[in-house]
Amino acid sequence: MRTNEDLFLQTIEKNRAIIYKVALLYTRSVEDRKDLMQEIILQLWKSFEKFENRSSISTWLYRVAMNTAFHHLKKDKRLQKIDSIEEIITIQDVVNNNQEELVSEMLMAIQQLNAMDKGIVILYLEDKNHKEIAKIMGITISNVGTRMQRAKLKLKEIIKTN
């Protein structure tokens, strides 16, 4: 029989990439990233028993991770320089070297969005639909659509000027 702790550890291990992606996009240094990942895992543990399976585990995990990241941003407004472009690229398993430049350019542009729009774009890139994104972000479905359109325009503008 599995204990709650075993189930939690298995869930974290299976979804480690989600935690890493959120931490990567909401921090600027390795130390801050590690701190945020630990804080996300702590918040997940604190709320694990309250998870009621009304949504998928990944939806719940994204919601806790995003809320923790938003709180982290409010608490720590300082932004540090990104350590290296290679570190940013690790968010994707880039197999084609020709895509590496495109991926890094897109991630640098996403970094420039505000916290809410950054979260919406990342969830969109994770193939979440508007309803799932709304649930995770705590906003309406129509607000997701509006913010997504604005974020796309902003990303095009950022990429065009670079």
Image (cartoon, rainbow, N blue to C red):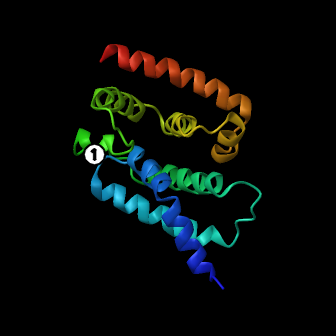
In the image, taking residue 105 as reference, residue 155 lies left or right, namely right
Q: Which residue: 52% across, 62% down?
A: 14
Write the residue at 33% across / 38% down.
95
Q: Of 57 and 115, which appears nearest the observer?
A: 57
- The tally of labels here is 1
Is there any visible trace of residue 81 in the rendered image? Answer: no
> Measuring 68% from the left and 73% from the top, which residue is drawn there?
49
Instruction: Establish if 107 lies above or below 8.
Output: above
**Residue 25 in the figure: left or right of residue 130:** left
Image coords of residue 22 (percent x, y): 46, 49
Q: Is residue 41 left or right of residue 102?
A: right
Which of the two residues, 54 or 146, is positioned nearer the viewer here? 54
Badge 1, how many Cα within 10 Å: few under 14, some, many 20+?
A: few
The residue at the far bottom in this view is 1
Q: Nearer the viewer, residue 115 or 34?
A: 34
Rendered-image quadrant of the C terminus = top left
- Report which quarter residue 6 is drawn in: bottom right
Q: Is residue 107 above or below residue 54?
A: above
Quarter holding the N terminus is bottom right
Seen as rendered, the residue at the extreme left is: 84
Indicate the amino acid at tag 1. Glu
Residue 124 position within the rendered picture, expressed as x and y whole percent measured from the top left: 57, 35
Where residue 51 appears, as percent x and y from the top left, is 70, 65
Q: Residue at x 49, y 36 (%)?
A: 118
Residue linked to disc 1: 87
Q: Quadrant of residue 61?
A: bottom right
* Secondary structure of the residue carrying numbered label 1: helix
Would residue 7 be seen by someone viewing this image from the given angle?
Answer: yes
The residue nearer to you, when weighing 72 against 106, is 106
Image position, residue 69 (x, y; %): 48, 52
